Amino acid sequence: YGEVHGGRGFRPATYVVPNLASLLLSPIDGEGVPRTEFGRQVAEGLADRLSLRVFCEEEMERAFESVDRDGNGMIDEEEVGQVLESVYAVMYGERIEAEKRQFFGEFEGATAGLGREEFAEKLLGLRRRAGYREGGNSNLSDFDLTKGLMDTLGMQSYCENELEAAFQAIDLDGNNCIDADELDALLQSVYMATYGKEIEKDKKKFFGRFYGNATSTSYRGGLSLQQFTERLLALQQELEGGSEGSELVEIRTEADAQRMIGRFSPILKDALDFVFDEFSTSDNNGSGVLNEDDVANFLIKVNGKLGRGGTWRHTRAMFEKKEKASAPAVLTRRDWYGVFARELGEGKWWQVVHDLEVCGANLRSKAKRDTLHYHGWLDYVYFDSRRLSCSAIQEALTATELFRVHVDGDALPNEWHPSDHLPVATVLTWR
């Protein structure tokens, strides 16, 4: 159930609000720098593996030379894969060793190895610890390596034939004893079976382009130094942020928040300053600050109570950060801007305008009337298409209501629909 559903054309957006971006933010100048999508742990591991500290030209050239193992001046997918494998090995190395010790116990450091009976006892013990039941159910979701080990050995019922076949598969030299080298070979294969898909996925992310709709097929000959450098700069953007990026709003780091603040329109800044001064009861050499009581008064004014809404989450995070740093528990004017930068980064233009206008600021009267609504597909129903099929959907609005929204310009929320989101409902049937 996405933007398109069978035979019905495009489904209506689930979020239709006045497009206030041009009122609140100045436009992005140029395409900006894209960013990778590895996730923090892999991105940090990759930067560390390539010895990237400041991402200067010299560091990136050295990184290119270290990855280009055959020295042909181009980096192919196999070379990228080798780097990522080493990153994953470092990331999960300690975890692998811990699970290895947990499984083999006293075998660690022994020279005799494991005989058939000892090995069978270990596997049966693993089955009990992993929570296997007679029906074959398991709670192995948190034991990726353990699950990979059992899958590699083909363990299902743990019958005598399966245990014997598993032993013979590991006992490569046929001496009826599993030694350290054979154990390492097993764990290596388990490791690749467990994390190989993730490595392959990350390899494609790195090797493919981050621009437009181009794919890695454009680079079958490999990546040149310039193309490799583009990807390292995108990696830096994921780790550090601070560049505009290709999205309208995108905040993951403090540098991103400061960049967003730099895009605030004069109208938005005036409104933020007005509300800040209205609630500020503390003084910071004449410039004013918001203490926790001041912020609580603001949140109750806009949300009706504490403990709900994005502004509550962002202000709480700021106060907690200051407490850890033993800094005064107050928000400066710049901190205040940061709260709303993060709200805008989540696409909450309407919410920002609502909160400021509830407190007496004047914003919407200054907006251009010919601006089209912002349409978003933010709400989804996810299901396993292998077991379920989507038989029907509920149209959230009638034809008349759709006309009022899209033709008359009656954006959400309004007097006949009190939410800025539309409900999503489906009928699912078993296949």
Image (cartoon, rainbow, N blue to C red):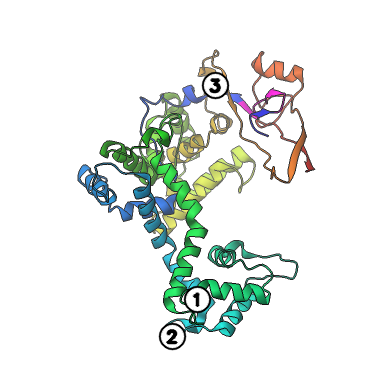
Residue 250 placed where, x, y %? Answer: 45, 36
User: Between 128 and 380, which is closer to the camera in this rendering?
Assistant: 128
Image quadrant in which the C terminus is located? top right
Q: Does the magenta stretch include residue 342?
A: no
Q: What element carries label 1?
A: loop
Identify the image quadrant of residue 405: top right
Q: What is the CA distance from the residue labelled 2 to the residue labelled 1?
A: 16 Å
Q: What is the number of the mark on residue 364?
A: 3
- Range shown magenta: 6-16
N-term mark: 1 or 3: 1
Q: What is the CA distance from the residue labelled 1 to the residue labelled 3?
A: 75 Å
> Badges 3 and 2: C-beta atoms under 8 Å apart?
no
Dot 1 crowding, Cα within 10 Å, few <14, some 14–19, many 20+:
many
Dot 2 crowding, Cα within 10 Å, few <14, some 14–19, many 20+:
few
Q: Where does label 2 land, which residue?
A: 110
Q: What is the number of the mark on residue 171?
A: 1
Tell me the chief SS of the magenta region: loop
> Badges 2 and 1: C-beta atoms under 8 Å apart?
no
Residue type, label 1 = Asp
